[in-house]
Amino acid sequence: MSDQQRQSPSEESIAEMFDTIAPRYDFLNSLLSFNQDKRWRKKLISLIPTKFNGTLVDMATGTGDVIINAAKKHREYATFLGLDISLQMMERAQQKAALAGLAQKISFKRASCEQTGLPAQFCDCISIAFGLRNTIDKDQALAEFYRVLKPSGYLLILEFFPPANSLFARIFQFYFQRILPLIGALFSNRAAYAYLPASVENFYQPNCLREKLQKMGFYPVKTHSFLFGACRLIAVKK
Ligand SMILES: C[S@@+](CC[C@H](N)C(=O)[O-])C[C@H]1O[C@@H](n2cnc3c(N)ncnc32)[C@H](O)[C@@H]1O
């Protein structure tokens, strides 16, 4: 077991944490991001390649905003699959998919990013929004994404990154570390919303992630930066 794994919480405790915050997750996301989260996910969805009969897997799908909106926009895809370790988060996703009339189109599976249980070269596109940072073993998750993608398949990662060294970064860090856990405690679970800034601080720097992806064999496609680089969208191709 590596040092990183020894210090990290277990997969069960992370699933439990997301189970606890599931009822308020969507509301708090919009509140804490001033509704910007929708715009960022929309940008991710706009980068999903057009693929007739395609298969899209949304890893760490949570309450399903990416997979549901992707299914609305990319009607040419045949298969939409959302994966997550939290059953409560996915239950919300299932309810939302049913409300959108997409219950037949989207399926959900309880599995981790590190061990999806999917066959090699299964899908044309993988999306992951605000999920990679939460995984116990990020390198293993990335290797699993590479395995599961078809040749020329796309991997789209939307994530918060450790703040750069600028005035805005310091303001953002203050908001993230001090204000956000307070609002989280008020409406949901304090521990979960205190975990959020910690998980961002321990995440890769953007360049480190890009290098890692390239070493694994991915080719860069596009990157977008939001909030002065605090949130980024990285698109790569196998
Ligand atoms: C911050 S939420 C993001 C949810 C959704 N993608 C979104 O855009 O709102 C993180 C999600 O990652 C899931 N998660 C955490 N670790 C995971 C893992 N190792 N494998 C799969 N899902 C994981 C959590 O259960 C949670 O639903």
Image (cartoon, rainbow, N blue to C red):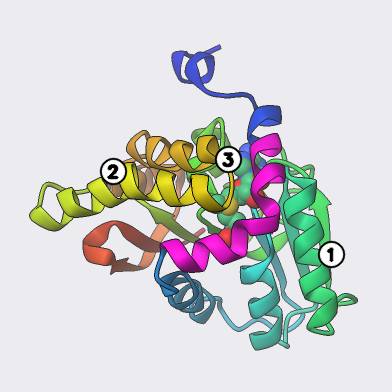
Amino acid on which disc 3 is placed = Ala
Residue range corresponding to the magenta coloring? 15-32
Asked whether 31 falls inside the magenta stretch, the response is yes
Q: Nearer the viewer, residue 57 or 88?
A: 88
Alpha carbon of mark 2 to alpha carbon of mark 1: how far? 33 Å
Q: Which residue is mark 1?
A: 107
Check disc 1 and report its element: helix, strand or loop: strand
Marker disc for residue 141: 3
- Is residue 62 visible in the rendered image? The answer is no
Q: Nearer the viewer, mark 1 or mark 3?
A: 1
Q: Nearer the viewer, residue 231 or 137?
A: 231
Alpha carbon of mark 3 to alpha carbon of mark 2: how far? 17 Å
Is 235 drawn above or below residue 10 in the view shown? below
Q: Earlier in the sequence, mark 3 or mark 2?
A: 3
Crowding near the residue tagged with mark 3, few <14, some 14–19, many ≥20 C-alpha atoms within 10 Å: some
- Residue 1: give x, y in percent of width and height: 56, 11
Asked whether 238 falls inside the magenta stretch, the response is no
Alpha carbon of mark 1 to alpha carbon of mark 3: how far? 21 Å
Label 1, ligand 1: CB separation under 8 Å = no
Q: Earlier in the sequence, mark 1 or mark 3?
A: 1
Amino acid on which disc 2 is placed = Gln
